[in-house]
Amino acid sequence: MTTDQTGTDRAARTEEITSGFPEAGPPRFDSIDAVRTGLASVDYLADDGIAGVVYLADRLAKPVLVEGPAGTGKTELAKSVARLTGSRLIRLQCYEGLDESKALYEWNYKKQLLRIQADSGQSWEQLEEDIFSEEFLLTRPLLEAIKSTEPVVLLIDEVDRVELETEALLLEILSEYQVSIPELGTVRARQIPLVFLTSNNTRELSEALKRRCLYLHIDYPQMERERAIIETRVPGISQSLADQVARIVRSIRTLDLKKAPSVSETLDWARTLVVLGVGSIDVEQARDTLHILLKYRSDIDRASKELAGLDTSG
Amino acid sequence: MLDLLTGFVAELRAAGIPVSLSEHLDAAETLKHVPLEDREAIKYTLGASLVKSSTHWPAYETAFEIYFSLRGPDHTIDGTEDEDGTGTDSDDEGAQTPGQGGRPGKGRGGGGGEGMTPEELADMLYKALLSANNSMIQAVARQAVSRYGGMEAGRPVGGTYYLYRTLRNLDLERVMERLVAQARQATSAENAEADHRGPDVTLTPLEERLLRDEYQARIDQLRKEIESEIRRRLVADRGSEALAKSIRKPLPEDIDVMHATRDELVALRKSLAPLSRKLAVRLARKRRHGRKGPLDFRSTVRHSLSTGGVPVEPRFRYPRPSKPEIIVIADISGSVASFARFTLHLVHAISSQFSKVRSFVFIDGIDEVTSYFEGVDDPAEAVHRINTEADVVWVDGHSDYGHALTVFWERWGEEITPRSSVLLLGDARNNYHASGSWVIKEIRARARHVYWLNPEPRAYWDSGDSIVGEYATYCDEVVECRTLRQLEHFVGELA
């Protein structure tokens, strides 16, 4: 932990340094059940694991690393929590080549240049102090989340896409909720944001990152939960159709496919069926609309063959 | 509670899950915030700080079940331990089964302290599965374990045998057929009433499939219940720590491929896809990052002219990463088949990292199977075709390395170049045939590298009819490759 001793306006900004661990604000949730019912009220159906981890993340003031197959509601979870708590959602989409100036902060060079040119009477010391002040700082998502005074949910999406080295950028903000700017000192969080990191597991994340996070694995839901999700998310679907959709999807997931249908694809499929006015699915309709559920030629062939019962051995 | 947690963490580490000290602290912190009576919540929240990879979850779950097993009055009843006191047993039995809906009376009458008769139990099982009633399924599991498990107190076993015995007696497959037949009848009767089309209208294949899946899910649930019931009794009998040691589940990447059970093989196959994807990404990255080739002297001197002959900026040759050409020769006879399958799968999944991959499989005859992988985007499919189509039996279908190698040399030996790396997979158990090790020597003379991957533990090498030592003299290296982790490591080094 470094204390900042240079600069003039720092004293006003920096909070007292009490310990290495940030103090958590008042808890957002009373109990695990409160999380679950709360999330249900914003149309996100959480299971035991999800509700428990979200609750814990709030209490322990720790970020949550959410992993799982694509389209199982990882990003949606962060959005729903933001909606539930009435916080602002700040999103950092990760990609290969992401760097400090796009994730944390950047100095506004043009403005600094203008400032230097506009006024030449000052001494260099004064000028330097001036142009490295907050006025010339462009905040990027991570710093934004830290500086915000209102409650914030920070979503760092697809963190597995950045290079291993870039991950290190996140470590300070994740464990201490602060950002160190060499010219300016340390900016500490005014409130502890709820942080969600999502990963599609295309590579192993570093131990250092994992250690700082709570880990949540979201898998394809159980059939009952999936049915409930379909019912809440697809307006105008009949109960029997939702049930049928959930059962067919479960059946398809047991097949050995390249890409099993995700929850979002299931929802798309259910919506399609509702739009088409299908009351009850038969083999023909299933086969005609399978391309919404599955995205590979070989998978579609396989699934339609299986569903038609040509090959019941599998 | 902290002691329990410490023991639990120690067990997780012993099972191969890396738990750091700070994660342990987090877990302890967790317990302050989560109501202790909510077992499911504890399980998920502890897991959130202790387990950081989804493949470790099954191992975690098993350990959790053992360390934080339910020890309420319902679960301390041990059918076998109470055998000497039959009176108390039947009392307990009565108290234990209120969820069964008026059945306990019958149970006591029929089984005489042991529970119900087989017929009654089968009947109850059937009804429980048909109605998907959770408490009933639990009750059935409990009954079935008392009735068929034949558990003996104090034996240091992991319970797999008890599970097997219980399941064998329940004969779940027949129950399944019965359920489906029943459903079929019911719908045909319904249809007959509704449309007067006659009783020959049956389930469409789609409906039947869905029903089957539904029942399968319920049966799986029953199987899980039985498993945890057995575990609970074992914990009650011998305590957590002793038990944890005997039923520790290896992580998928640590499973011994040769002796994997069917379930473990499924787990392996599942973890193979992400593993090969990760490996490919890592290798590609390694290649991309290793930007600098050897110093380009001429270019350095030429560029130094602009700085007055001082070589300020050294120039490097553009690297030409040599992508090796891989030739895999795999024994696919029974004992090592699954290992060969995994290796072929993995090598082909990352074939973009090699300039060429050719595969041969043999038992006592040998056949080239490279074409099976061409134009197929899923290696698993090709591997499946190998098992059914490749022509690998020459005489009797027992491994004959000597003959297979000789034929390989005659037919394809010419095609080995100094750029090829040759991988031989097999346990070198040759059934006392001629070894044909001269072929390896010849291959070694032509190829860049010759590696032998042996799925057997090192201690068994050269025992019985294994002659891996004889081949080893001509190989660059013989690698023990029993688990996916070892395999991944080897393939990573290769590329």
Image: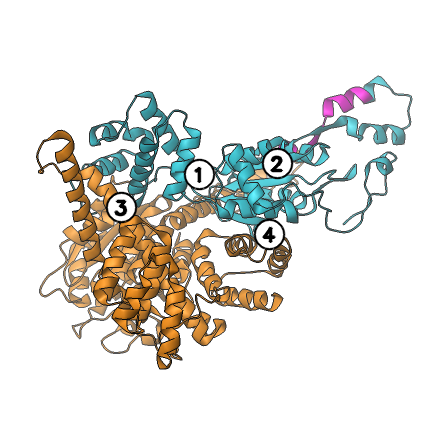
Q: Secondary structure at mark 4?
A: helix
Chain that appears cyan: A
A243 w.r.t. A237: above or below:
below
Q: Mark 3 to mark 2: distance in Å?
A: 40 Å
Q: Mark 1 to mark 3: distance in Å?
A: 22 Å
- Asked if the magenta segment contains residue A102, the reply would be yes
Q: Secondary structure at mark 2?
A: strand
Q: Which residues are magenta?
A: A100-115
Which quadrant of the rendered structure holds the N terminus of chain B?
bottom right
Extreme top residue here? A118
In this rendering, the label closer to the viewer, 1 or 3: 3
Q: Amino acid at mark 3?
A: Asp
x and y, in percent, of residue A55 in the image = 59, 45
In this rendering, the label closer to the viewer, 1 or 4: 1
Q: Secondary structure at mark 1?
A: loop
Label 2 or label 1, whichever comes before in sequence order: 1
x and y, in percent, of residue B180 in the image = 19, 48
In this rendering, the label closer to the viewer, 3 or 2: 3
Q: Residues within 10 Å of mark 4 (few under 14, many from 20)?
A: few
Shade representing chain B: orange
Q: Tell me whether marks 1 and 3 sit on the same chain.
A: no
Compare residues B108 and B479 and report the one nearer the observer.
Answer: B108
Query: Can the viewer see residue B333 in this picture?
Result: yes
Q: Which residue is mark 3?
A: B213
Q: Which residue is mark 2?
A: A154
Compare residues B406 and B229 and report the one nearer the observer.
Answer: B229
Q: Amino acid at mark 4?
A: Ala
Q: Which residue is mark 4?
A: A208
- Asked if the magenta segment contains residue B253, the reply would be no
x and y, in percent, of residue B237 in the image = 43, 75
